[in-house]
Image: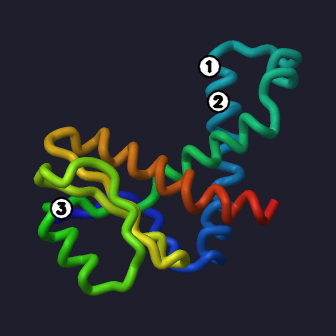
């Protein structure tokens, strides 16, 4: 069993703070990408909208969520120690699970996989963000 990622927010306030801290980083990423695409000032102003920067911030936040990768047995053991709602996608008949606890919602989001660990991690992070973090952050806006 191993973990990857940087963000494991335990409260809604932690989510908001970590998301807020990504604001300038997402603006920098978007600006540098636009520069590498040779956008002139006019094209930059036209195409780089608040929505584009928000999408970059959302993607950065999701990509930094901490996940645990383990066997199905390790996942079941982890779940047995907590009274979390379980949102598990995938097949019951595969050997591995990647999961992320959404602590403030007392929910664990997981996905099973056989051999494509990186793909499972990416999918799980997008699902966790889309199902739990986006709504929380959207309600704050």
Question: How far apart are labels 1 and 3 at the CA level?
Answer: 39 Å
Judge left or right: residue 46 versus residue 86: right
The percent coordinates of residue 126 (x first, y second) are: 48, 47
Dot 3 corresponds to which residue?
70
Q: CB atoms at circles 3 and 2 under 8 Å apart?
A: no
Quadrant of the rendered image containing residue 33: top right
Question: Residue drawn 56% across and 62% down?
Answer: 132
Q: Are marks 1 and 2 in contact (CB under 8 Å)?
A: yes
Left or right: where 29 falls relative to 5: right
Counting from the top left corner in percent of width and height, residue 115 is at 15, 41
Percent of width and height locating residue 139? 76, 63
Distance in Å between CA atoms under marks 1 and 2:
6 Å
Q: Quadrant of the C terminus?
A: bottom right
Query: Which label sits on residue 32?
Result: 2
20 over 125 or under it: above or below? below
| Residue under label 1 | 36
Q: Residue at x 74, y 57 (%)?
A: 138
User: Looking at the picture, how far across and down is residue 24, in whole percent?
Assistant: 70, 50
Q: Are marks 1 and 3 in contact (CB under 8 Å)?
A: no
């Amino acid at each position: 069993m191993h973990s990857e990622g940087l963000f494991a927010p335990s409260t809604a306030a932690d989510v908001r703070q970590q998301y807020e801290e990504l604001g300038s980083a997402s603006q920098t990423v978007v600006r540098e990408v636009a520069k590498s695409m040779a956008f002139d000032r006019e094209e930059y102003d036209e195409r780089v909208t608040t929505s584009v920067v928000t999408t970059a911030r959302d993607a950065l936040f999701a990509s930094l969520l901490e996940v645990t990768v383990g066997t199905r047995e390790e996942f079941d053991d982890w779940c047995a120690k907590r009274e979390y709602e379980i949102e598990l996608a995938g097949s019951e008949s595969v050997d591995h699970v990647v999961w992320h606890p959404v602590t403030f919602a007392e929910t664990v989001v997981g996905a099973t996989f056989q051999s494509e660990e990186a793909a499972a991690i990416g999918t799980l992070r997008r699902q966790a963000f889309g199902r739990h973090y986006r709504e929380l952050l959207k309600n704050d806006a």
